[in-house]
Amino acid sequence: MTGTTQDDYTDRYARRVRGMTTSEIRALFSVASRPEVVSLAGGSPYIAALPLDAVGEMLGELAAQQGATSLQYGIGQGTIDLRERICEVMSLSGITNASPDDVVVTVGGQQALDLLARLFLDPGDVVLAEGPTYVGALGVFQAAQAQVRHVAMDDEGLIPAALEEAIRATAREGRQAKFLYTIPTFQNPAGVTLSEERREQILDICERAGLLVVEDDPYGMLSFEGDAPLPLRARRRDGVFYCSTFSKTFAPGLRVGWVLAPHAVREKLVMMSEANVLCPSAFAQAAVTQYLSTMPWREQIKVYREIYRERRDALLSALEDLMPAGTTWTRPTGGLFVWATLPEGLDSKAMMPRAIAARVAYVPGTGFYADGTGRGNMRLNYSFSAPERLREGVRRLSGVMEQELAMRAVFGEAGLQPGHQRRRGPAAADAPGPDLA
């Protein structure tokens, strides 16, 4: 019947589809993009900081001069020119032993995760991941019908003892986790960075357990306070899959990312990619290659760092000045996000409709946990909005929280949602650091 919302295909879907849910971030986009709403929700880079006239001229010349090849089909692994440039980019982060032969170009960082999930995960397999973790990764693992087990973090990132316990707990069930998925640098959503000491500890633990590591590093070049720590892949070659993207340092609309894989696995990743998309966009690859070859992209990253540092400081200042007592938050040294913990009893998911009514948006913490916990947390983004806009957003959000606290004082526990669970700091760590309360 025309206009009906009933899904008549439910009984025909594959089993993997039945457990899939809508991303809480994507669901917010339609309202968060309204001009009257101050959005602290998304993770969008500030594209207006690019020299758009020069980029537009570059793209026009690319189409005019290389259109016969850049608008044609390409190869599944990606062009050799781009893979060579990717190796140059990774060398700036400390990965100096990468070969273009071991790089597979993907349709954004998201496809990189999807290819690895397709390659390694069978239904029911276990993936270990930080808690909280990237919502897009949770969607990929959910689609693969894998079980995600979260490993606690504190202000120094993933806790080695918690990782060891997660590995033991999985083994006690007669199972073995397939890989550890981690965002060790400027983590999304928590904003914390895995310490130098722990990087070696985590790698040692994974090596002893025979556990592969999927390192997701989209933010590593966006450091505000000196150089970021060396990636895990710069320390160990075997068993570490390094994923990154140009979405945060150039343009997300081009959808160009990559996987650096152990050589033995490379060909299988290429076959997976060819089965999935045939080949990544030749034009998008040529655009990124041209950008890296002809434009001052290193200087542009410095521009982004300065802009995001200023906006981070504006957000942290507003939180300090305006948030109700009992609210705590992380203090990132790079990346795009702050992770906030609400005063006792507040529920970020239940509060969302009232926040939207007050014309401010954030992402409830529940979107970053496979088990739906995290109601006492929220992710706040500072990359997209101007400093004064960030402060206004925090002012509106604080007002909503004050109203919620006042209602709670009147009505007590009655307003607390069933299943409410809090996470201290970025995770349920026993002893979080001083900034994570």
Image (spheres, grey):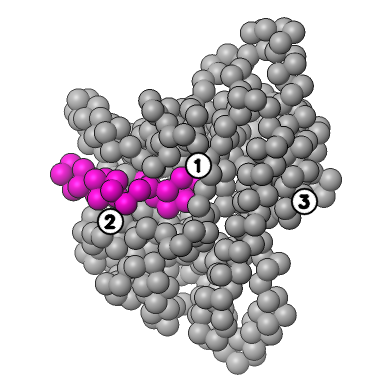
Q: Which residues are magenta?
A: 181-210
Residue type (three-letter) at the residue carrying disc 1: Ala
Residue type (three-letter) at the residue carrying disc 3: Glu
User: Marks 2 and 3, Cα distance to the nearest angstrom?
Assistant: 41 Å
**Which of these two is toward me, 207 or 111?**
207
Q: Which residue is mark 3?
A: 388
Label 2: how many Cα within 10 Å (few below 14, some 14–19, many 20+)? many
Q: Which residue is mark 1?
A: 190
Q: Quadrant of residue 100?
A: bottom left
Secondary structure found at label 3: helix
List x then y, in percent, for residue 167. 24, 34
The label nearer to you, 2 versus 3, is 3
| Residue that lies at the very extreme toward the left in this rendered image | 208
Label 1: how many Cα within 10 Å (few below 14, some 14–19, many 20+)? many
The correct choice, above or below, for 212 with respect to 237 in the image is: above
User: Marks 2 and 1, Cα distance to the nearest angstrom?
Assistant: 22 Å
Q: Please tell me which of labels 2 and 1 falls first in the chain.
A: 1
Residue type (three-letter) at the residue carrying disc 2: Val
